[in-house]
Image (cartoon, rainbow, N blue to C red):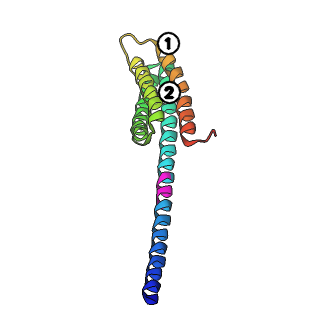
Amino acid sequence: MDSVTAIVVALLTIGGSLLGVWAGWRLGMSERLRQWRRDKQIDAYSELLSASADVAGAASHELQAETDEEHAAAGRETGTAMLRYHDALHRANIVASPSVRLVVDELARSMSAGIRELHNRDNRDDEAVSEHLVAAADLRKRVSEAAREDFGFDR
C-alpha cells in the first residue's frame, strides 16, 4: 500500500505542478491579449482624433479659399485628409468599446454633415459648416474622455 500511496502522491504533485504552470501561462496570455487590445484601441483612437482634426483644418482652408487656385489646392487637401480620416474611422470602429463607439458614431455624423455642406456647391452655408466643425472639435474631446473612462485612466 505504501508504494501505491507514494505513486499517487507523486502523480498528484506532478499533475498539480503541470496544472499550475498551465494556469499561469493562461493568465499571462490573457493579460498580454488584453494589453495588446488596449494598445490597438489607443492607437486607433489617436489616429482618428488626429485625422479628424486634419479634416477640420483642411475644411477651414477650403472655407477661406478666395481664388480658384486656392480652392482647388484646399479641396485636394480636404480629399487627402478625408481618405486618412475614413481609414481611421473604420479602424476605430473595429476596436472601439461600445461606450466609445457611440461617441465615434456621433463624430462621424458631424464630420460627414460638415463636409457635405462644405461641398454643397449650389447653396453652401458657411456658418453651418463652421458649426459642424466646432461640434466635431467637441466630439473629439468626448471621444478622448470616453476612452480615458473606458481604460480607467481617471480613477
72 lies above or below 99:
above
Q: Are marks 2 and 1 in contact (CB under 8 Å)?
A: no
Task: Name the residue at the right extreme.
Answer: 155
Of 133 and 4, the residue lying toward us: 4
Please tell me whether the stretch drawn in magenta is mainly helix, strand or loop: helix
Task: Name the residue at the front extreme.
Answer: 1
Please state the horizontal and vertical placement of residue 121, each as a whole percent of the image: 37, 15
Q: Secondary structure at mark 1?
A: helix
Q: Secondary structure at mark 2?
A: helix
Picture residue at 44% right of the left edge, 20% below the top: 114
The residue wearing badge 2 is 56
Picture residue at 44% right of the left edge, 89% below the top: 3
Q: What residue type is disc 1 on?
A: Glu
One can see residue 72 in this view: no
Please state the horizontal and vertical placement of residue 146, each as a whole percent of the image: 54, 34
Of 89 and 25, the residue lying toward us: 25
Residue 93 sits inside the magenta stretch: no
Q: Quadrant of the C terminus?
A: top right
150 lies above or below 55:
below
Picture residue at 50% right of the left edge, 39% below the top: 45
**Residue stretch in magenta:** 29-34
**Of the residues under marks 2 and 1, which one precedes in the sequence?**
2
